[in-house]
Image: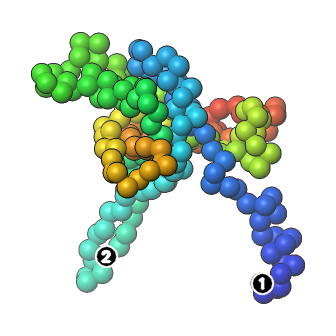
Amino acid sequence: MIFNIETFRSSGLVDGGARPSLFNIRMTGLPEGAGTTQQQISVLATATTIPSSELDLIEIPYMGRRIKIAGERIFRDWTVTIMNDEDFAIRDLFETWSNKINALVSNRQDSSSSNLLDYKVDSVEVLQYGKAGPGDDSGIIRGYMFHGMFPYVVRDIQLDWSRGNQIETFDVTFAYDYWTPETIGSSTPGYTGLLNPA
C-alpha cells in the first residue's frame, strides 16, 4: 500500500540513499606540466554534477499536430567548482591549457597543441562513493568518464572586502565529445572501468 510507511521502509531507499557530498573528481593525463596539480584538483574540487543523459528531438508537423521522434544525442557542458589556494596552481593549469589552445596575445594555437589530440584529454572522471566512504576504489558505486575534454571557460574569481573568512572559488566549464558510465564489476570487487562503451 503506497501510503503505508512500511512500504517505503521495505521498498524505498533500502540502501539509505546516495549522498551528493560523497564524490571525487580524477583528472589524469592532463597537459604537460600538470604535475602534482592533478592531486590538488581531486582534493579542492568542491562541486560538480553527474552529467545528464539527453537526446535531441525532431518534431515533424502533421495536420496541425507535431510528432516527436528521437534525434541525435546531446552532451552538455560540464562545470567544476574549485577552491583557490594562494599558489594559484590549479587556476594556472587551466589558464595555461586554455592559452595553448588560443594564445591571449598572438591569437594563435601553440605548436604543441596543433591538433585535437594534443589539447583534448580522455581520462577525466567524476566518481560517486557509497556511505562506507572513499577509502579506495572499492567504495565507488558509480562513475562517469569524459572523453575528448578541454576547458573552454575559466570563470572569474569574485573579490569583495565584505567577504572575509571565506576561501576563493572559481568555476571551470569543459566541453567534451561524450561520456561513458562506469560501475562496480560483478566478478571482482571494486572499480573495474567501462560499463558499456558502445
> Mark 1 against mark 2, which lies toward the viewer?
1
Q: Which residue is mark 2?
A: 66
Q: Secondary structure at mark 1?
A: loop
Q: Which mark is residue 2?
A: 1
The answer to which quarter of the image holds residue 170 is top left
Q: Position of residue 14 (x, y in %)?
A: 82, 63
Q: Position of residue 188 (x, y in %)?
A: 81, 31
Determine whether, in the image, residue 170 is placed left or right of residue 198. left
Q: Nearer the viewer, residue 130 or 120?
A: 130
Quarter occupied by the C terminus: top right
Residue at point 46% right, 33% down?
85
| 5 versus 97 height, above or below | below
Q: Which mark is residue 174?
A: none
| Number of numbered discs on residues | 2
Q: How is the image coloured?
A: rainbow
Q: Nearer the viewer, residue 187 or 164?
A: 164
Residue at point 73% right, 60% down?
17
Determine whether, in the image, residue 37 is placed left or right of residue 77. right
* Kind of residue indicated by mark 1: Ile
Q: Secondary structure at mark 2?
A: strand
Q: CA distance from mark 1 to mark 2?
A: 36 Å
Among the two numbered marks 1 and 2 on one chain, the one whose residue lies closer to the N terminus: 1
Determine whether, in the image, residue 47 is placed left or right of residue 112. right
Please rate how many residues cluster around mark 1, counting C-alpha atoms within 10 Å: few if below 14, some from 14 to 19, many from 20: few
| 101 versus 169 height, above or below | above
Quarter occupied by the N terminus: bottom right
Residue at point 56% right, 26% down?
39
* Kind of residue indicated by mark 2: Arg
Please rate how many residues cluster around mark 2, counting C-alpha atoms within 10 Å: few if below 14, some from 14 to 19, many from 20: few
Q: Is residue 67 visible?
A: yes
Q: Position of residue 12 (x, y in %)?
A: 78, 70
